[in-house]
Image (cartoon, rainbow, N blue to C red):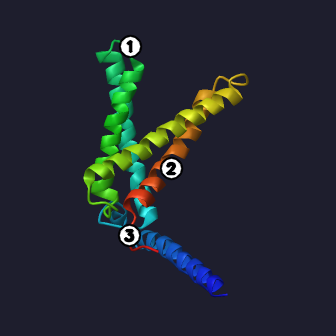
Amino acid sequence: MEREHGKRISREKESMKEQNVWQEVKDILRQKQFGKLFSGDTENTLIQFFRYCFVDGAATVVDWGVSSLLFYFVFAQAHAVVANAISFVLGLIVNYLLSILWIFKKPKTSNRFVEFLGFAVIGVVGLLLTMGITKLFEWWLADITITYQIIGKIVSTAVAFFWNFFARKYLLFSDKKEG
């Protein structure tokens, strides 16, 4: 009986917390204080997610840009895997730096090296998810359509994006006192 009561209270607290997250964003939009979406520290998941769209976009531009520069101009259209590996690492560094400067202000560890390693591991898992999902789409759709690669890329990019954001937020940066 007491356990059920505890679970109900926990669900109610979680529901109130979720309503507060949405309410803060509604208030910002209603009051036309759009700058709050871009500046100031926040633990609001929706605002952090909004900012992460820009951070991940910038990291993607670095990743794709460096990959193209290396592949076409440095390696003379050879060594695509090396170009992609280097560009992935540079994109990861950009993502990490922008994330800790703009989005995630409350790390679970005070050791920046450990924090970066965790950040990188989550990124590598995202990369593996992307590769796996793309391969699945190749198996499922290669005989049906030549667009399997782009379909797989779109789906895998979305899955990896959500994985990277939520894993980093909750495993590396969530407030220790939350919940």
Amino acid type of disc 2? Trp
Pointer 2: what residue?
Answer: 163
Amino acid type of disc 3? Lys
**Structural crowding at the residue carrying mark 1, measured as other residues with C-alpha within 10 Å and reported as few (<14), some (14–19) or many (≥20):** few
Please tell me which residue lies in front, 165 or 111. 111
The quadrant in which residue 1 appears is: bottom right
The quadrant in which residue 81 appears is: top left
Please tell me which residue lies in front, 148 or 104. 104
Amino acid type of disc 1? Gln
Question: In the picture shown, does residue 40 fall above or below 49?
Answer: below
Q: Earlier in the sequence, mark 3 or mark 2?
A: 2
Measuring from the top left, give residue 35's x and y in whole percent.
33, 64
Q: Viewed as shown, does residue 156 lie left or right of 51? A: right
The quadrant in which residue 65 appears is: top left
Pointer 3: what residue?
Answer: 176
Mark 3 and mark 1: span between their CA atoms? 48 Å
Mark 1 and mark 2: span between their CA atoms? 32 Å
Which residue corresponds to the image point at 35% horizontal and 17% vertical from the top-left?
72
Question: In the picture shown, does residue 158 fall above or below 45?
Answer: above
Q: Nearer the viewer, mark 3 or mark 1?
A: 3
**Structural crowding at the residue carrying mark 2, measured as other residues with C-alpha within 10 Å and reported as few (<14), some (14–19) or many (≥20):** some
Q: Earlier in the sequence, mark 1 or mark 2?
A: 1
Mark 3 and mark 2: span between their CA atoms? 20 Å
Marks 1/2 in contact by CB < 8 Å: the verdict is no
**Structural crowding at the residue carrying mark 3, measured as other residues with C-alpha within 10 Å and reported as few (<14), some (14–19) or many (≥20):** few
Measuring from the top left, give residue 74's x and y in whole percent.
29, 17
Which residue corresponds to the image point at 51% horizontal and 50% vertical from the top-left?
162
Q: Nearer the viewer, mark 3 or mark 2?
A: 3
Which residue corresponds to the image point at 40% horizontal and 64% vertical from the top-left?
174
Measuring from the top left, give residue 94's x and y in whole percent.
30, 43
Image mark for residue 133: none
Pointer 1: what residue?
Answer: 77
